[in-house]
Each structure stands twice: as structure tokens, then as C-alpha cells.
Image: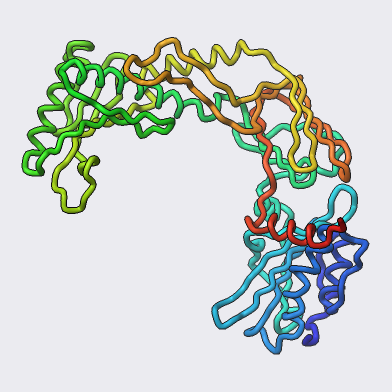
Amino acid sequence: MPARTPPFSSIPFELRPELRMILESILSGKVPPRDLFDEASWQYYLGYVKPKLSKVYNSPSPDVARLEVYVSPSYLALHPVIETPRGAIARAYLFGVSEDGRVFVNRLLRPPIAYDAVQLASNISLAVVDDVKVYNDLGYDFDVASQEEVVIEPPYQDTGRYRVQGDIVLAVRPWFEIPGLLERVQTYAERLLMDVVNRILIDAGLSTVTAASGARDSFILLYFTVPPRSRERYISKLKELIKGGLEELYGEKALQTHDPGEIGFVGGEFKDCHVRVGAIRDTLRPDRFNPYLDLIVMFWCSATTPLISETAKEVHEAFNKTPFTDMEFTIGNHHVRLTNIKSLSFTFRPKRQPLTLDEFVINVRNPRTFLITKDSRVELLHPEHGLKTVRFAGTYIARFEHVNVAPIFPSERNRVILRNLKV
């Protein structure tokens, strides 16, 4: 390996002793001490990191292989770049120290951002960054993993993401409303409007096919075989039929006609909802030589629709009446015990249901997301990291997440663990 200029020891930066030992070994072309690592990270280092570093050591120039080193007070990142005829192979590896004092290795999506670097050799550079940049790359804002008990209070009206233990991140934000509820209530309102229009068409003697899945892509289809030259005429006739039926139910003042195929509500419970009539390719005979069209009716409601506001209020009232409870679950090797919390994944069946469509249940899914208060408590137990207790300064939404790593990292880590497993 080319001689280092300037000497590594002359560069001032702060770095944990364990990581400094690893960096000094790497820059000297040596293998770091094994007892610094946990077993899985040591095997990962030998299997994935060391081969890349060897190519850097044996490289005649930075055009063949180079190494970018990033140091912060708590982390060490290595970014080996190997040039090949098919392009550059670049990896970003992160070294940190767990609560038990042993070094772990992760693979990042990208190296930390740094603007000033010092050349240690012709193909090795070193840049100093702060911990916050590494936190952001890993998907959190604060690292409280070293504290046995912590009280969390995120910034006002902002999300605070805390690494609480190992690779577990707790994303906390102020409590305003149930996440994901608005979209589900919008779907409910659109489904009720779809039911009203469907009954108008059925009463006129038309045969309809409804597509009403969980997503907001519900529509009514009329198999029709409309020739292209008659498209606008039939769209107009269907629109006038729907408009007349809606006027009988809600009055002329509640409706407003937009472009040739659209009807908008300007009053009533469906205010700011829209019904759009159009034509699509014949779905019964989807042949590219078939020129005929089917008619389709689509629906869309704004978040300002009165029915949506009323239903959301009804759901919130029902949610507020549900009692706080305790819960336990496991994330990897982390056993999580929650005290006095409410899960933000739940179902609610509105009293008003469509008549010509399937029953609609408002199903809100927020995995591992909870409503927490000053009376709530989170305990995390890990065989290596021990027990961590988390309390909160107010009422928040808390979601359990993992740190950000390269998507392929879990499979690489599984490979080295299983390869070295003695069974």
C-alpha cells in the first residue's frame, strides 16, 4: 500500500477507542482484533468487508480501487470503490459500538456526506463528519441507546426519531389525529356515493358491474359496445340520467356541471365530491382490433366533504372510548413490553352502509404504532443489550421502526451467520 501523507496520527478528530483501533489496523493493512466485534459482525467483516479492503491495499492506483474513510465521534464508515470493466462496485460499511461495548457492522445505502477530505495515500482519503449526519443516514435524529432509562419529548410539531436499543428506532410525533384514517373515510364516502349512483342506474333498467376493492379506485362499469363515433353522445345521455337522479335526491342547487362528462356537488353531504362518466376499451373483448368501448362511472371526494368530516369525528369518538391496555411483541431479538397504550390499528363499522355494494368496514392499519401518554411505558429487553425503559413527556404517536440499512444487508448477514453456524 502506498505511503500515507500526511501521517494518520497528525490528523485531529474524535473517535471512540474501539473504532480507532479498527481504523488504525485497517490503514496499516492488518486485520482488526477479533475480540472487538460481536460474532456475527466479525464474520460479516471477514466475508464482505475484508475482501474489498484487500483490493484497495493491492491497487496500483486510485483508478483501480480506492477507499474513502469517514469518521465521527461515534461511528466509522468505510466506502471502498472497486473499478471493473462493467463499472464501479461501491459499498458503504458502518462500524459502531453497541450498548454491550462490542463493535457492530452495518451496510449503508450510501456513505455520509462530507465536503472536505484529507488524502492519507494516493487511493485513501479521510473525512471528518458529525454524528448527526450518520444518524440521518441510519434514519434517526437522536441516539439514546446508552441510557438505561430515558424520557422522550420530540421537538414541537415535529417528529423525533430515537434509536432506543440496537437497531430499534422509536419515531415519536405529537398526537393530532389517527394516521391513515382520512384516506379510509374518503374511500367510505366515495363508496356511499357510488351506491347512490348505482341504484339510479339499476332503477333505469341498466345492468351494472361494480368494482369496489379496498383501494380508492372504485367504479361502475356498463358493458355497452359503444362505437367510437357515438362515444360523446352516450356519455352525455348517461351523465344526464345520473344528474337527473341526483337532482331528485339532493336538489338542483346541490349539483354543478363541469366538463361534458363530470358532475360536481356544491352542497349537501357530498359537497366537493365528483362523479365522472367516461368510456374505456371493451373489457369483454379486449382485442386490439376491437374498436368498441364500454361506459364507466368514477368517483372522487375531497377531504372537505361534510360526510367525511362527520364520519371521521364518529370514528375518533369511538376510538377515544376504547380503554388503554398493555401489549407485548417481539422485533428480532428485542422483546417489547408496552404499558397503558392504545394500538392505532383498528376497525370501525359505520352505521350507514351501502345497499347495492358489499358491507364497508373502516380498517385502519398502522403496524407497531401506538397512542402513548405520560402514563405509558415502554420496556425493551435484549439478551445482549439488556433492559431499556422509555417514558414520555406528553401525549404522542409512537411507531417502532428499524434503522436504515442497505436492503441486501440482512441477506448478506444471514448468509455469514448460517455458514458459520455449527449444527
Asked whether residue 14 is in view, the answer is no
- Work out which residue is located at the far right of the displayed protein and give it: 35
Image quarter for residue 391?
top right
Asked if residue 383 is positioned above or below residue 338 in the image, the reply reads below
**321 or 191: which is nearer to us?**
191
Q: Is residue 142 left or right of residue 12?
A: left
The foreground one among 374 and 347 is 347
* Left or right of 142 on screen, residue 302: left
**Residue 46: percent from the left, percent from the top?**
81, 69
Task: Name the residue: 70% across, 38% down.
Answer: 170
Q: For this rendering, which residue is in front, 364 or 281?
A: 281
Counting from the top left corner in percent of width and height, residue 210 is at 30, 28
Q: Identify the coloring.
A: rainbow
Q: Residue at x 72, y 63 (%)?
A: 93
Q: Quadrant of residue 423?
A: bottom right
Residue at 10% x, 32% y is: 234
> In the visual, does 22 lie left or right of 250?
right
Q: If the image is split into quadrants, where does the N terminus sit?
A: bottom right
Answer whether residue 286 is visible to the viewer in this image: yes
- In the figure, 320 relative to 152: above or below? above
Q: What percent of the width, then of the height, locates residue 372?
A: 69, 24
Q: Position of residue 237 (x, y in %)?
A: 10, 27
User: How many numbered discs, if any?
Assistant: 0
Residue drawn at x 70%, y 51% as measured from the top left: 135
